[in-house]
Image (spheres, rainbow, N blue to C red):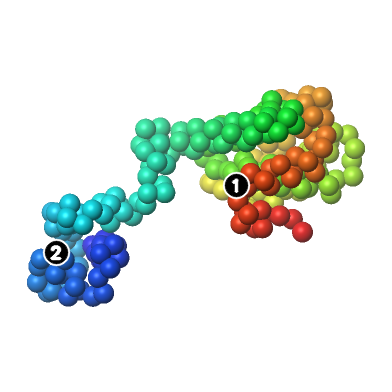
Amino acid sequence: MTEIILNRLSGVLNSQNEKELAEFLDVKQNTISTWKQREKIPLQEIYDLAQKKDFSLDYVLLGRTQKNEILNDFEALLGEKGAQEYLAQKLIELVAQKFQMQNLGIYEPLGRFLGFFSKAGADGLYARPLLFLYYVLQNLEKVENQNPKEKLIEAIRITPFHRFVFGPEFNKKTIENIIDHVDLRMDDEEIKILIGNPSTTLKTLEEMMPIAMVKAHRIN
């Protein structure tokens, strides 16, 4: 661990070797080697240097980057599972709102359709509801069944869940639970609204997604 921390410190200081790192820390070069051998983390020296050089202690000591500090705060307040559930719910709401802004009329059906994932995190299932929707919309074109509910369920069955769902609780039973969620909580009218114009819905969704995400998950 000490070596990892000192390597991060070298990176933020742009030091090329132990001699340069020792100069930054105002210690002898062999002190660096001793710290590594004894697994001693020079907390005070790193803290003092951070005050002078203005770098992130979270990154050097914990490996946290600015990008995930907010997520770390959520997890500190809500726990890992609680944070996953909260963020999934907010993502679902955001996607639904953007569709509403496009006047596609699928705000409520979409929220209900993706609702399974807003609670799944609390059960140890970690998923990306945006990608779930993206794959299902693409799969609708492959399904010949014209009954709306059966068509949607078949599109779910052929979705490659392994590409965006993970966690110790994910298995074939999970897929059946998602299908049961659709079967029991969505009526035929809602489903007709949701999948009534999949090409337009798909296009709108792709406009929300980063180009790299679209390229990585578009089904050819």
Q: Secondary structure at mark 2?
A: helix
Q: Residue at x 25, y 70 (%)?
A: 15
Residue 5: name its quadrant.
Answer: bottom left
At label 1, which amino acid type do we have? Val
Residue 141 x, y percent position in the rendering: 83, 47
**How many C-alpha atoms fall within 10 Å of the one at disc 2: few (<14), some, or many (≥20)?**
some
Q: Residue at x 40, y 36 (%)?
A: 74
Residue 36: name its quadrant.
Answer: bottom left
Q: Which residue is mark 1?
A: 165
- The image shows residue 99, relative to residue 43, as above or below, that is above
Q: Could you tell me how far apart the alpha carbons at marks 2 and 1 are, in whole angstroms?
A: 45 Å
At label 2, which amino acid type do we have? Leu
Q: Secondary structure at mark 1?
A: strand
- The image shows residue 124, relative to residue 65, as above or below, that is above
Q: Which residue is mark 2?
A: 25
Pointer 2 and pointer 1: residues touching (CB < 8 Å)?
A: no
Precedes in sequence: disc 2 or disc 1 = 2
Residue 118 x, y percent position in the rendering: 57, 33
68 vs 44, left or right, is right
> Which of 36 and 194 lies nearest the eye of the viewer?
194
112 vs 38, left or right, is right
> Which of 210 and 84 lies nearest the eye of the viewer?
210
Q: Residue at x 37, y 45 (%)?
A: 69
